[in-house]
Amino acid sequence: MKTKDAELVLNTEGSIYHLKLNPGDVAETIFLVGDPGRAHLISTYFDEIEFSTQNREINTFTGYYKGKRLTVMSTGMGTDNIEIVVNELDALFNIDFETKMPKEDKTILNLIRIGTSGALQGDISVVESYVVSEYSIGLDGLAYFYKDGPYVIEKEMTDEFIGYMNWDIHLPRPYGIKGSEYLLEKLATGWIKGITLTAPGFYAPQGRELRLEVQDKTIIDRAHQFTYDGFRITNFEMETSALYSLSAMLGHNAMTVCDIIANRVNNEFNPNYKESMKNLIHQMLERVLEL
């Protein structure tokens, strides 16, 4: 079915609206980071930069690392930003911009998020701990806006979490979603694996208070005891559930690995995490050479 002009929105020069990219600008293996500065940092490891551009909070660099073509892109923070980025990346590869028709032969992307996160288990150190999201539980409700959302989520996991937490019906309905088996097998060896809670905000949705009081102060205490399929809830962040659910619906591979810089159980924060992040970036660059 042809995509409507007001739905596949293009800029005057033909690039896709938010990313400001054209087909061919992006590699099939893409690192996604929240921070535009981190996108630039990763690009400095490339042996050659073929293309770079910036629009809003989205910085994009495409180049080569040891002969492999890669892209790194900043998304900004939150599931709403990820929703835009993943849909537009897919369109760059899988919709013909001239005819506005989906292509018959689809390209499968490898979408790898490198982020920072707060641990929800007391035994996870804030010094050089890397956590891979085997699963994510989204507290944002995004998957339910899509017709295929209920078909890609982990229904049993979702129901168990809602029941265990006695989830407030006035909050968005959570959904559990698994990362790409392919990327988890290829890239995640030797790192901590667990369930990531994806929150629709940094403060109250993650139990933080400044001047506004949190409605439910027990979410962290209850959630960190939940387990599913042998995995416990390891960390809180703000993007992975959207990345995993959209990728599953579109047929892409997705995985998140986070550098743990805070521990919410022990009330610890590591302000000197930049070297740890550089180490994670270098490890991931080496690992993706196997894809």
Image: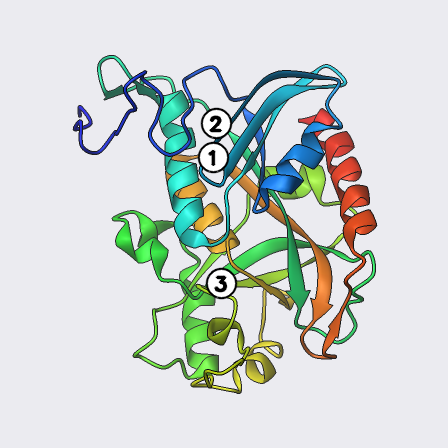
- Are discs 2 and 3 less than 8 Å apart at CB? no
Q: Is residue 156 above or below residue 207?
A: above
Q: Tell me how far mark 2 sits from mark 3, CA to CA.
A: 24 Å
In the picture of the structure, the residue carrying the numbered disc 2 is: 108
**Image x and y of residue 238, in percent:** 51, 58
In the picture of the structure, the residue carrying the numbered disc 1 is: 252
- Are discs 1 and 3 less than 8 Å apart at CB? no
- Are discs 2 and 1 less than 8 Å apart at CB? yes
In the picture of the structure, the residue carrying the numbered disc 3 is: 137
Amino acid at dot 3: Ile
Q: Earlier in the sequence, mark 2 or mark 3?
A: 2
Secondary element under disc 2, as helix, strand or loop, is loop
**Image x and y of residue 213, in percent:** 46, 86
Q: Earlier in the sequence, mark 1 or mark 3?
A: 3
Identify the residue shown where x is 27% and y is 54%: 145
Amino acid at dot 1: His
**Image x and y of residue 203, in percent:** 51, 72
Identify the residue shown where x is 48% and y is 76%: 204
Please state, as top left, top right, bottom left or bottom right, where the C terminus lies in the image: top right
Secondary element under disc 1, as helix, strand or loop, is loop
